[in-house]
Amino acid sequence: MPRSVLNKTELFTLVPPSEAWRILSSNLDATTRREMVPLARALDRVTVKNIEAPDNLPSFVRSTMDGYAVRASDTYGASEGLPALLRVVGEVPMGQAPELSLSPGDAVLVHTGGMLPQGADAVVMIENTQMVGDDIEVFRPVAPGENLVQIGEDVHLGEEILPSGHLLRPQDLGALAGMGVVEVEVTARPRVAILATGDEVVPPSTRPAPGQIRDINTTVLCALVERAGGEALPLGIATDAYQAVLDAAQHGVKIADALVIIAGSSVSTRDITAQVIDQLGEPGLLVHGVAMRPGKPTILAVADGKPVLGLPGNPVSALVAAKLFLVPAIYRMAGLDAPRPSTVTARLSQNIPSAPGREDYVPVRLVERDGETWGEPVFGKSNLIFTTVRADGWVRVPLDLGGLLAGDKVTVILW
Protein backbone atom coordinates (compact mmCIF):
# COMPACT_ATOMS: atom_id res chain seq x y z
CA MET A 1 0.00 0.00 0.00
CA PRO A 2 1.61 3.33 -1.02
CA ARG A 3 2.48 5.81 1.68
CA SER A 4 0.45 9.02 1.95
CA VAL A 5 2.94 11.87 1.53
CA LEU A 6 2.49 15.57 0.96
CA ASN A 7 4.26 17.00 -2.06
CA LYS A 8 7.45 18.71 -0.87
CA THR A 9 6.32 21.97 -2.45
CA GLU A 10 3.30 21.93 -0.14
CA LEU A 11 5.19 21.47 3.12
CA PHE A 12 4.65 25.05 4.26
CA THR A 13 0.90 24.92 3.63
CA LEU A 14 -0.89 24.73 6.97
CA VAL A 15 -2.83 21.50 7.47
CA PRO A 16 -5.82 21.13 9.84
CA PRO A 17 -4.99 19.02 12.93
CA SER A 18 -7.29 16.14 11.96
CA GLU A 19 -5.75 15.94 8.47
CA ALA A 20 -2.25 16.20 9.94
CA TRP A 21 -2.94 13.21 12.18
CA ARG A 22 -4.43 11.25 9.26
CA ILE A 23 -1.29 11.82 7.21
CA LEU A 24 1.02 10.87 10.06
CA SER A 25 -0.91 7.77 11.16
CA SER A 26 -1.29 6.44 7.61
CA ASN A 27 2.50 6.35 7.31
CA LEU A 28 3.21 4.54 10.56
CA ASP A 29 4.16 0.89 10.47
CA ALA A 30 1.71 -1.44 12.20
CA THR A 31 4.46 -3.74 13.50
CA THR A 32 5.27 -3.55 17.19
CA ARG A 33 7.96 -5.07 19.37
CA ARG A 34 6.78 -7.68 21.84
CA GLU A 35 8.06 -9.13 25.09
CA MET A 36 7.12 -11.51 27.89
CA VAL A 37 6.52 -9.84 31.25
CA PRO A 38 5.63 -11.23 34.69
CA LEU A 39 1.98 -10.85 35.58
CA ALA A 40 2.89 -8.42 38.37
CA ARG A 41 4.28 -5.97 35.75
CA ALA A 42 1.58 -6.43 33.12
CA LEU A 43 -0.86 -3.72 34.27
CA ASP A 44 -1.75 -1.33 31.41
CA ARG A 45 0.20 -3.43 28.91
CA VAL A 46 -1.33 -4.66 25.65
CA THR A 47 -1.74 -8.33 24.73
CA VAL A 48 -0.27 -9.37 21.38
CA LYS A 49 -2.31 -12.54 20.90
CA ASN A 50 -5.53 -14.15 22.11
CA ILE A 51 -5.20 -15.80 25.51
CA GLU A 52 -7.10 -19.06 26.01
CA ALA A 53 -8.04 -20.66 29.29
CA PRO A 54 -5.53 -23.39 30.18
CA ASP A 55 -8.06 -24.99 32.53
CA ASN A 56 -11.64 -24.85 33.72
CA LEU A 57 -12.42 -22.22 36.32
CA PRO A 58 -13.47 -23.36 38.79
CA SER A 59 -11.91 -26.76 38.33
CA PHE A 60 -14.23 -28.44 40.85
CA VAL A 61 -17.84 -28.02 42.02
CA ARG A 62 -17.81 -25.79 45.08
CA SER A 63 -20.22 -24.25 47.54
CA THR A 64 -21.18 -20.58 47.42
CA MET A 65 -22.53 -20.65 50.97
CA ASP A 66 -21.78 -21.90 54.45
CA GLY A 67 -24.18 -24.80 54.91
CA TYR A 68 -24.70 -28.49 54.35
CA ALA A 69 -24.02 -30.48 51.20
CA VAL A 70 -27.05 -32.68 50.54
CA ARG A 71 -28.90 -34.70 47.95
CA ALA A 72 -31.55 -32.22 46.80
CA SER A 73 -34.18 -34.96 46.65
CA ASP A 74 -33.79 -35.52 50.41
CA THR A 75 -35.11 -31.98 51.05
CA TYR A 76 -38.17 -32.02 48.81
CA GLY A 77 -41.29 -30.97 50.74
CA ALA A 78 -39.33 -29.66 53.73
CA SER A 79 -40.93 -26.78 55.62
CA GLU A 80 -40.78 -25.16 59.06
CA GLY A 81 -43.81 -27.17 60.08
CA LEU A 82 -42.46 -30.42 58.65
CA PRO A 83 -38.66 -30.23 58.33
CA ALA A 84 -36.52 -32.89 56.68
CA LEU A 85 -34.27 -34.71 59.16
CA LEU A 86 -30.78 -35.55 57.83
CA ARG A 87 -27.75 -37.27 59.37
CA VAL A 88 -24.57 -35.14 59.59
CA VAL A 89 -21.80 -37.53 58.63
CA GLY A 90 -18.83 -35.16 58.53
CA GLU A 91 -17.27 -31.91 57.39
CA VAL A 92 -15.32 -30.89 54.30
CA PRO A 93 -12.04 -29.19 55.39
CA MET A 94 -11.21 -26.03 53.42
CA GLY A 95 -8.52 -26.52 50.83
CA GLN A 96 -8.92 -30.30 50.77
CA ALA A 97 -10.82 -32.77 48.66
CA PRO A 98 -13.54 -34.55 50.69
CA GLU A 99 -12.81 -38.17 51.47
CA LEU A 100 -16.42 -39.11 52.19
CA SER A 101 -19.49 -39.51 49.99
CA LEU A 102 -23.18 -39.05 50.70
CA SER A 103 -25.76 -41.78 50.99
CA PRO A 104 -29.51 -41.06 50.98
CA GLY A 105 -30.45 -39.04 54.09
CA ASP A 106 -26.88 -37.79 54.72
CA ALA A 107 -25.58 -34.22 55.04
CA VAL A 108 -22.01 -32.89 55.21
CA LEU A 109 -20.97 -29.51 56.63
CA VAL A 110 -19.31 -27.33 53.96
CA HIS A 111 -17.96 -23.79 53.93
CA THR A 112 -18.04 -21.09 51.26
CA GLY A 113 -15.66 -22.15 48.50
CA GLY A 114 -15.41 -25.72 49.77
CA MET A 115 -15.44 -28.68 47.40
CA LEU A 116 -18.69 -30.62 47.10
CA PRO A 117 -18.46 -34.24 48.30
CA GLN A 118 -19.40 -37.12 46.03
CA GLY A 119 -23.11 -37.91 46.01
CA ALA A 120 -24.20 -34.35 46.87
CA ASP A 121 -25.86 -32.08 44.30
CA ALA A 122 -26.89 -29.00 46.33
CA VAL A 123 -26.10 -27.01 49.46
CA VAL A 124 -28.62 -25.97 52.10
CA MET A 125 -27.84 -22.57 53.66
CA ILE A 126 -26.95 -22.95 57.31
CA GLU A 127 -29.62 -20.35 58.17
CA ASN A 128 -32.28 -22.78 56.94
CA THR A 129 -31.21 -25.57 59.26
CA GLN A 130 -31.25 -26.41 62.95
CA MET A 131 -29.09 -28.90 64.83
CA VAL A 132 -30.93 -31.69 66.65
CA GLY A 133 -28.28 -33.70 68.42
CA ASP A 134 -25.97 -35.00 65.67
CA ASP A 135 -28.63 -34.45 62.98
CA ILE A 136 -30.04 -31.37 61.28
CA GLU A 137 -33.54 -30.28 60.48
CA VAL A 138 -33.91 -28.62 57.05
CA PHE A 139 -36.72 -26.07 56.84
CA ARG A 140 -36.54 -25.17 53.13
CA PRO A 141 -36.02 -27.46 50.14
CA VAL A 142 -33.22 -26.93 47.59
CA ALA A 143 -33.05 -27.77 43.91
CA PRO A 144 -30.17 -29.63 42.23
CA GLY A 145 -27.29 -27.20 41.66
CA GLU A 146 -28.55 -24.66 44.19
CA ASN A 147 -25.84 -22.68 46.01
CA LEU A 148 -23.13 -24.26 43.89
CA VAL A 149 -20.62 -23.11 41.28
CA GLN A 150 -20.17 -25.74 38.59
CA ILE A 151 -16.93 -26.79 36.87
CA GLY A 152 -16.09 -24.23 34.18
CA GLU A 153 -18.98 -21.95 35.12
CA ASP A 154 -16.63 -18.94 35.06
CA VAL A 155 -14.41 -20.05 32.16
CA HIS A 156 -14.20 -23.27 30.15
CA LEU A 157 -10.96 -24.96 29.14
CA GLY A 158 -9.82 -23.54 25.78
CA GLU A 159 -12.20 -20.57 25.87
CA GLU A 160 -10.76 -17.23 24.73
CA ILE A 161 -10.49 -15.19 27.90
CA LEU A 162 -8.70 -12.09 26.54
CA PRO A 163 -8.34 -10.95 22.91
CA SER A 164 -5.21 -9.63 21.28
CA GLY A 165 -4.82 -5.86 21.48
CA HIS A 166 -6.40 -5.78 24.95
CA LEU A 167 -5.25 -3.25 27.54
CA LEU A 168 -4.74 -5.25 30.71
CA ARG A 169 -6.72 -4.01 33.73
CA PRO A 170 -6.47 -5.08 37.40
CA GLN A 171 -9.40 -7.51 37.02
CA ASP A 172 -7.76 -9.03 33.94
CA LEU A 173 -4.60 -9.73 35.93
CA GLY A 174 -6.69 -11.33 38.66
CA ALA A 175 -8.44 -13.56 36.13
CA LEU A 176 -5.11 -14.65 34.66
CA ALA A 177 -3.74 -15.34 38.14
CA GLY A 178 -6.79 -17.51 38.81
CA MET A 179 -5.92 -19.53 35.69
CA GLY A 180 -2.31 -19.99 36.76
CA VAL A 181 -0.96 -17.64 34.09
CA VAL A 182 2.15 -16.04 35.58
CA GLU A 183 3.55 -14.19 32.54
CA VAL A 184 1.99 -12.53 29.51
CA GLU A 185 3.23 -11.67 26.04
CA VAL A 186 2.59 -7.95 25.46
CA THR A 187 3.69 -5.19 23.16
CA ALA A 188 6.88 -3.55 24.34
CA ARG A 189 6.51 -0.03 25.67
CA PRO A 190 7.25 2.34 22.77
CA ARG A 191 10.58 4.09 23.35
CA VAL A 192 10.44 7.80 22.61
CA ALA A 193 13.71 9.72 22.34
CA ILE A 194 13.36 13.40 23.27
CA LEU A 195 15.91 15.93 22.07
CA ALA A 196 15.84 19.57 23.17
CA THR A 197 17.72 22.12 21.09
CA GLY A 198 18.74 25.73 21.50
CA ASP A 199 21.84 27.69 22.49
CA GLU A 200 19.72 29.48 25.08
CA VAL A 201 18.40 26.29 26.74
CA VAL A 202 20.06 24.91 29.90
CA PRO A 203 19.17 21.96 32.17
CA PRO A 204 16.71 22.60 35.05
CA SER A 205 19.53 22.11 37.53
CA THR A 206 21.49 25.02 36.06
CA ARG A 207 20.88 28.62 37.10
CA PRO A 208 20.26 30.45 33.81
CA ALA A 209 22.59 33.28 32.85
CA PRO A 210 21.07 36.38 31.26
CA GLY A 211 19.42 35.33 27.99
CA GLN A 212 19.18 31.67 28.97
CA ILE A 213 16.12 29.59 29.95
CA ARG A 214 15.70 26.29 31.74
CA ASP A 215 14.56 23.30 29.72
CA ILE A 216 10.88 22.78 30.60
CA ASN A 217 9.82 20.76 27.60
CA THR A 218 11.90 17.63 28.18
CA THR A 219 10.34 17.16 31.62
CA VAL A 220 6.81 17.75 30.31
CA LEU A 221 7.21 15.43 27.34
CA CYS A 222 8.87 12.66 29.35
CA ALA A 223 5.89 12.73 31.71
CA LEU A 224 3.42 12.64 28.80
CA VAL A 225 5.24 9.71 27.25
CA GLU A 226 5.26 7.75 30.51
CA ARG A 227 1.58 8.47 31.16
CA ALA A 228 0.69 7.24 27.65
CA GLY A 229 2.46 3.96 28.32
CA GLY A 230 5.74 4.73 26.58
CA GLU A 231 9.33 4.80 27.77
CA ALA A 232 10.96 8.22 27.60
CA LEU A 233 14.61 8.47 26.56
CA PRO A 234 15.81 12.05 27.11
CA LEU A 235 18.79 12.86 24.89
CA GLY A 236 19.75 16.14 26.52
CA ILE A 237 20.18 19.51 24.80
CA ALA A 238 21.81 20.06 21.40
CA THR A 239 23.22 23.39 20.30
CA ASP A 240 21.76 25.34 17.37
CA ALA A 241 24.19 23.74 14.92
CA TYR A 242 23.03 21.52 12.08
CA GLN A 243 25.58 18.76 12.64
CA ALA A 244 24.99 18.67 16.40
CA VAL A 245 21.24 18.28 15.92
CA LEU A 246 21.68 15.74 13.11
CA ASP A 247 24.08 13.57 15.11
CA ALA A 248 21.78 13.54 18.15
CA ALA A 249 18.68 12.91 16.03
CA GLN A 250 20.28 10.00 14.18
CA HIS A 251 21.24 8.47 17.51
CA GLY A 252 17.66 8.96 18.78
CA VAL A 253 16.10 7.26 15.75
CA LYS A 254 18.53 4.37 16.15
CA ILE A 255 17.80 3.64 19.81
CA ALA A 256 14.10 4.48 19.96
CA ASP A 257 10.77 3.76 18.27
CA ALA A 258 9.96 7.46 17.91
CA LEU A 259 11.83 10.77 18.08
CA VAL A 260 10.76 14.20 19.25
CA ILE A 261 12.93 17.23 18.51
CA ILE A 262 12.03 20.37 20.43
CA ALA A 263 13.10 23.33 18.32
CA GLY A 264 14.42 26.58 19.69
CA SER A 265 12.40 29.76 19.31
CA SER A 266 14.32 31.23 16.37
CA VAL A 267 13.26 30.73 12.74
CA SER A 268 16.75 29.49 11.85
CA THR A 269 16.53 26.77 14.50
CA ARG A 270 13.18 25.58 13.15
CA ASP A 271 14.71 25.46 9.67
CA ILE A 272 17.55 23.30 11.01
CA THR A 273 15.01 20.96 12.64
CA ALA A 274 13.08 20.52 9.40
CA GLN A 275 16.27 19.84 7.42
CA VAL A 276 17.50 17.32 9.97
CA ILE A 277 14.19 15.47 10.17
CA ASP A 278 14.05 15.10 6.40
CA GLN A 279 17.43 13.31 6.47
CA LEU A 280 16.47 10.63 8.99
CA GLY A 281 14.65 8.17 6.72
CA GLU A 282 11.83 7.68 4.25
CA PRO A 283 9.38 9.18 3.54
CA GLY A 284 10.65 12.08 5.65
CA LEU A 285 8.67 15.27 6.17
CA LEU A 286 4.92 14.90 5.84
CA VAL A 287 3.53 18.04 7.46
CA HIS A 288 5.35 21.30 8.13
CA GLY A 289 2.92 23.60 9.88
CA VAL A 290 -0.50 22.84 11.40
CA ALA A 291 -3.51 25.19 11.36
CA MET A 292 -3.69 25.53 15.12
CA ARG A 293 -2.78 27.90 17.92
CA PRO A 294 -0.65 27.29 19.83
CA GLY A 295 1.54 24.83 17.93
CA LYS A 296 1.48 26.18 14.39
CA PRO A 297 5.18 25.36 13.61
CA THR A 298 4.69 21.64 14.40
CA ILE A 299 6.52 19.24 12.05
CA LEU A 300 5.31 15.68 11.46
CA ALA A 301 7.44 13.07 9.73
CA VAL A 302 8.11 9.37 9.50
CA ALA A 303 11.59 7.86 9.22
CA ASP A 304 11.46 4.26 8.03
CA GLY A 305 8.26 3.54 9.93
CA LYS A 306 9.14 5.54 13.05
CA PRO A 307 7.26 8.76 13.86
CA VAL A 308 9.42 11.88 14.14
CA LEU A 309 7.93 15.08 15.52
CA GLY A 310 9.40 18.56 15.52
CA LEU A 311 7.67 20.52 18.26
CA PRO A 312 7.75 24.25 18.93
CA GLY A 313 10.02 25.43 21.72
CA ASN A 314 7.31 27.35 23.60
CA PRO A 315 6.12 25.03 26.40
CA VAL A 316 2.37 25.43 25.88
CA SER A 317 2.75 24.95 22.13
CA ALA A 318 4.84 21.82 22.69
CA LEU A 319 2.34 20.46 25.21
CA VAL A 320 -0.70 20.97 22.96
CA ALA A 321 1.04 19.53 19.89
CA ALA A 322 2.28 16.53 21.89
CA LYS A 323 -1.21 15.83 23.22
CA LEU A 324 -2.62 15.95 19.68
CA PHE A 325 0.06 13.96 17.84
CA LEU A 326 2.65 12.31 20.09
CA VAL A 327 0.24 10.68 22.56
CA PRO A 328 -1.96 9.00 19.92
CA ALA A 329 1.18 7.90 18.06
CA ILE A 330 2.40 6.14 21.22
CA TYR A 331 -0.91 4.33 21.55
CA ARG A 332 -0.78 3.37 17.87
CA MET A 333 2.72 1.93 18.32
CA ALA A 334 1.45 -0.06 21.31
CA GLY A 335 -1.34 -1.55 19.18
CA LEU A 336 -4.17 0.56 20.61
CA ASP A 337 -6.42 3.40 19.61
CA ALA A 338 -5.95 6.42 21.86
CA PRO A 339 -8.67 6.53 24.52
CA ARG A 340 -11.32 9.19 24.34
CA PRO A 341 -10.33 12.11 26.57
CA SER A 342 -12.32 12.88 29.68
CA THR A 343 -14.52 15.92 29.18
CA VAL A 344 -16.80 18.22 31.15
CA THR A 345 -19.53 20.50 29.82
CA ALA A 346 -19.22 24.05 31.14
CA ARG A 347 -20.61 27.49 30.43
CA LEU A 348 -17.99 29.93 29.15
CA SER A 349 -17.39 32.90 31.44
CA GLN A 350 -16.02 35.24 28.76
CA ASN A 351 -15.42 35.51 25.04
CA ILE A 352 -12.64 33.55 23.36
CA PRO A 353 -11.52 35.30 20.17
CA SER A 354 -10.20 33.25 17.26
CA ALA A 355 -9.71 33.42 13.50
CA PRO A 356 -11.45 31.20 10.95
CA GLY A 357 -9.16 28.66 9.35
CA ARG A 358 -7.32 27.55 12.47
CA GLU A 359 -8.12 25.58 15.62
CA ASP A 360 -7.46 27.35 18.89
CA TYR A 361 -6.74 25.47 22.12
CA VAL A 362 -7.35 27.68 25.15
CA PRO A 363 -6.59 26.63 28.76
CA VAL A 364 -9.68 26.78 30.97
CA ARG A 365 -10.17 26.72 34.73
CA LEU A 366 -13.38 25.13 36.04
CA VAL A 367 -15.40 26.80 38.80
CA GLU A 368 -18.81 26.11 40.32
CA ARG A 369 -21.36 28.93 40.56
CA ASP A 370 -24.91 28.44 41.78
CA GLY A 371 -24.81 24.74 40.99
CA GLU A 372 -23.48 25.22 37.43
CA THR A 373 -20.01 24.53 36.05
CA TRP A 374 -18.31 27.50 34.42
CA GLY A 375 -15.15 27.57 32.34
CA GLU A 376 -12.86 30.54 32.87
CA PRO A 377 -10.30 30.99 30.05
CA VAL A 378 -6.71 31.34 31.23
CA PHE A 379 -5.21 33.58 28.58
CA GLY A 380 -1.48 33.89 28.15
CA LYS A 381 1.36 33.60 25.67
CA SER A 382 2.47 30.12 24.61
CA ASN A 383 5.78 30.44 26.45
CA LEU A 384 4.02 30.76 29.82
CA ILE A 385 3.76 27.25 31.27
CA PHE A 386 1.74 28.38 34.29
CA THR A 387 -1.27 29.11 32.09
CA THR A 388 -1.63 25.33 31.91
CA VAL A 389 -0.79 24.80 35.58
CA ARG A 390 -3.67 27.09 36.56
CA ALA A 391 -6.10 25.34 34.20
CA ASP A 392 -8.10 22.13 34.48
CA GLY A 393 -8.26 21.50 30.74
CA TRP A 394 -8.68 23.22 27.42
CA VAL A 395 -11.41 24.33 25.06
CA ARG A 396 -11.06 23.76 21.32
CA VAL A 397 -12.31 26.48 18.99
CA PRO A 398 -13.17 24.76 15.67
CA LEU A 399 -11.65 25.79 12.35
CA ASP A 400 -14.83 27.34 11.00
CA LEU A 401 -15.60 29.61 13.95
CA GLY A 402 -14.34 33.10 14.63
CA GLY A 403 -14.40 32.48 18.37
CA LEU A 404 -16.70 31.52 21.23
CA LEU A 405 -19.02 33.79 23.19
CA ALA A 406 -19.49 34.24 26.92
CA GLY A 407 -22.42 32.10 28.03
CA ASP A 408 -21.83 29.43 25.37
CA LYS A 409 -21.86 25.84 26.56
CA VAL A 410 -18.52 24.27 25.66
CA THR A 411 -16.77 20.95 26.05
CA VAL A 412 -13.71 21.19 28.26
CA ILE A 413 -11.10 18.52 27.52
CA LEU A 414 -9.56 17.69 30.89
CA TRP A 415 -5.79 17.44 31.26
Image: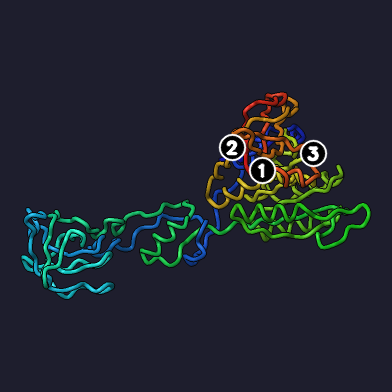
The answer to whether residue 250 is seen in the rendering is yes
Taking the image as shown, residue 319 lies to the left or right of residue 92, namely: right
Q: Position of residue 389 (x, y in %)?
A: 72, 47
Q: Nearer the viewer, residue 245 or 311?
A: 311
Identify the residue at image location x=52%, y=60%: 34
In the image, residue 187 sits, relative to residue 409, either above or below, namely below
Discs 1, 2 touching: Cβ within 8 Å: yes
Disc 3, SS = loop
The answer to whether residue 241 is seen in the rendering is no
Count of all numbered marks drawn on residues in the image: 3
Dot 1, crowdedness within 10 Å: few (<14), some or many (≥20)? some
Disc 1, SS = loop
Q: Which mark is residue 380?
A: 3
Q: CA distance from mark 1 to mark 2?
A: 10 Å
- Rendered-image quadrant of the C terminus: top right
Q: CA distance from mark 2 to mark 3?
A: 22 Å
Which of marks 2 and 1 precedes in the sequence?
A: 2
Residue hosting label 1: 392
Residue hosting label 2: 344
Taking the image as shown, residue 72 lies to the left or right of residue 363, namely: left
Q: CA distance from mark 1 to mark 3?
A: 15 Å
Which of marks 3 and 1 precedes in the sequence?
A: 3
Q: Amino acid at mark 1?
A: Asp
Dot 2, crowdedness within 10 Å: few (<14), some or many (≥20)? some
Which of marks 3 and 2 precedes in the sequence?
A: 2
- Rendered-image quadrant of the N terminus: top right
Taking the image as shown, residue 113 lies to the left or right of residue 52, namely: left
Residue 405, image quadrant: top right
